[in-house]
Amino acid sequence: MNMKKVLLFALVLMLAAPMSAQWSVGGKIGLNTSSVNYPDDIENPSHCFGINGGFLTQYRFNRFFSLQAELLYMKQGYKEKDLIWINMGDDPMDMDIALHYLEIPLLAKFTHKTGLNLQLGPQIGFLLKRRLRVGEVVQQQKLMGEKQPFDFSLAFGAGYEFKNGFLFDFRYLLGLTSAYKNVEGFQNRTFYFSLGYKFDL
């Protein structure tokens, strides 16, 4: 399906929406814990913690269904403990990989009359910066493989919206592309929780 057909389909949906449909905008901030999916022959990494935050816009077709787009900053990554590095001595040191993304989720939201909702949709991330720390040594590019500028993921989760506009979400982010070009595995795996507020336009 080309872009013209996608835009036409979206326009038809909006025109077919009932009069109760409306736009909302808001912001959110939260915490996440992330790791990566290692290849089978490598030990599982440890989780690392990060923050997320940004803006959201929602188009509500009716009280049960809406589409929500977000623009988020999110820090992801992973850790490895007690590694021996060549030319860095014989003592084991921890490795910490930090990946900073600008994330754009596009989610379908199915909302119950109580305020509970289920969320599902694609998410694309644009790599802003990456950092590797081994012990006290910080490097921006070396020892990390070729940079992967985009991260495609599937986001799904649940949330709750209060009548006064406050909301919270809990999602799981299933990475579909490797964090490094031409390398198998290393897809991001992230749980993230956020609190926010939105209002109708």
Image (tube, rainbow, N blue to C red):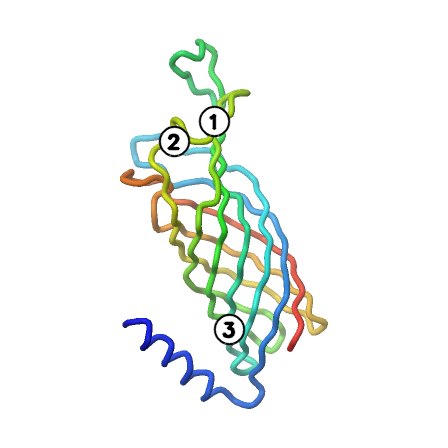
**SS at mark 1 in the image:** strand
Mark closest to the chain's N terminus, 3 or 2: 3
In the image, is residue 82 above or below residue 189? above
Q: Is residue 150 left or right of residue 14?
A: left
Residue 14: x percent and y percent?
47, 83
Mark 1 residue type:
Gln
Mark closest to the chain's N terminus, 2 or 1: 1
Residue 138: x percent and y percent?
51, 25
Q: Which residue is mark 3?
A: 110
Q: Calculate the distance from the C-alpha at mark 2 to the C-alpha at mark 1.
A: 9 Å
In the image, farthest residue toward the right? 164
Q: Which residue is mark 2?
A: 144
Question: Residue at image x 38%, y 49%?
Answer: 150
Q: Nearer the viewer, mark 3 or mark 2?
A: 2
Mark 2 residue type:
Met
Q: Calculate the distance from the C-alpha at mark 3 to the C-alpha at mark 1.
A: 43 Å
**SS at mark 2 in the image:** loop
Question: Residue at image x 42%, y 45%?
Answer: 188
Q: Quadrant of the N terminus?
A: bottom left
Name the foreground residue: 110 vs 196: 196
Q: Quadrant of the C terminus?
A: bottom right
Q: Which residue is mark 1?
A: 139
Question: Residue at image x 56%, y 69%?
Answer: 57
In the image, is residue 16 above or below residue 67? below
Name the foreground residue: 19 vs 7: 7
Residue 32: x percent and y percent?
56, 47
Mark closest to the chain's N terminus, 3 or 1: 3
Mark 3 residue type:
Phe
Image marks 2 and 1: residues in contact by CB distance under 8 Å? yes
**SS at mark 3 in the image:** strand
Residue 86: x percent and y percent?
38, 14
Tell me where residue 72 sits by quadrant. Answer: bottom right
